[in-house]
Amino acid sequence: MRVIVAGGGSVGTAIAKDLQNRHHDVVLIEQDPVVAERLRSLLPGVSIIAADACEYAALSQADLRNADVVIAATGDDEDNLVVSWLSKQEFAVPRVISRINNQRNEWLFNDNWGVDVSVSTPALITSLVDEAVEVGSIVKLLDLAHGKMNLIEVTLAENSPAVASQSTLEDLNLPDGLRVVAVVRAEQPVAPSGTMNFYAGDHVILMTREDCTPACTAAFVG
């Protein structure tokens, strides 16, 4: 996919690097020319544009009309909203993801501003803290599709049904509204397959509808 990242701070840089490592075509827009120059050395596989992502001309230079995803990842909520709105309204980008810096502004990050998915970094950190102390519990990472879908994570315990029964992913026969999208095992991502087994300590990332939470609990929590 072709992904445009607005903001070359620590968050935007980490996102761009990860996406490039996953073999996506990544363009990063950074306003500060000194920072942009440094990022060219730090991210050799990423196209860096030194410009203000809040300006139409900068987004046009990045060729947003051919972008699959735009990620507004600056440290300023107002800038992220402007980038999101321009991306959706002026360039019809199919998917716009926006970072929320201040929880008090969360109510603004919706489709009125062109935001398809909003991400609060503090909320993600909180989820990861919760995860560390709640092995065997379901931790919500993101709301998607305006709350109709969730990205969740379960850290499997020894008594997890999927572990105890030595079931494969295919054996679990999960409903259509519940999909395993990744497994992190020993700090390494594992692509899901029908024949894979699950082990205690696995971090299972799932996309789920709200009504499929019981099925997730039955398979992975018990």
Image (tube, rainbow, N blue to C red):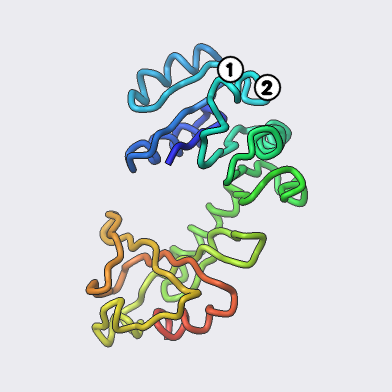
Q: Is residue 150 left or right of residue 159?
A: right
Asked if the residue at tag 1 contacts the one at tag 2, i.e. Cβ–Cβ closer than 8 Å, the answer is: yes
Residue 173: give x, y in percent of width and height: 36, 83
- Structural crowding at the residue carrying mark 2, measured as other residues with C-alpha within 10 Å and reported as few (<14), some (14–19) or many (≥20): few
Residue at (42, 17) in percent of width and height = 38
Q: Nearer the viewer, residue 152 or 147?
A: 147
Residue 94: give x, y in percent of width and height: 58, 45
What is the tally of numbered marks visible in this picture?
A: 2
In the displayed structure, 179 sits above or below 213; it is above
Kindly report the distance in space between the C-alpha atoms of the residues bearing marks 2 and 1.
Answer: 8 Å
Quarter of the image with the C terminus is bottom left
Q: Nearer the viewer, residue 191 or 166?
A: 191
Q: Secondary structure at mark 2?
A: loop
In the displayed structure, 18 sits above or below 182; it is above
Q: Secondary structure at mark 1?
A: loop
Residue at (32, 60) in percent of width and height = 184
Quarter of the image with the N terminus is top left
Residue 89: give x, y in percent of width and height: 71, 37
In terms of image quadrants, where is residue 97?
top right
Mark 2 lies on residue:
55
Name the disc covering residue 17, or none: none
Residue at (44, 63) in percent of width and height = 132
In terms of image quadrants, where is residue 126?
bottom right
Residue at (34, 83) in percent of width and height = 172
Mark 1 lies on residue:
51
Q: Is residue 105 left or right of residue 213?
A: right
- Structural crowding at the residue carrying mark 1, measured as other residues with C-alpha within 10 Å and reported as few (<14), some (14–19) or many (≥20): many
Amino acid on which the number 1 mark rests in the picture: Ala
Amino acid on which the number 2 mark rests in the picture: Glu
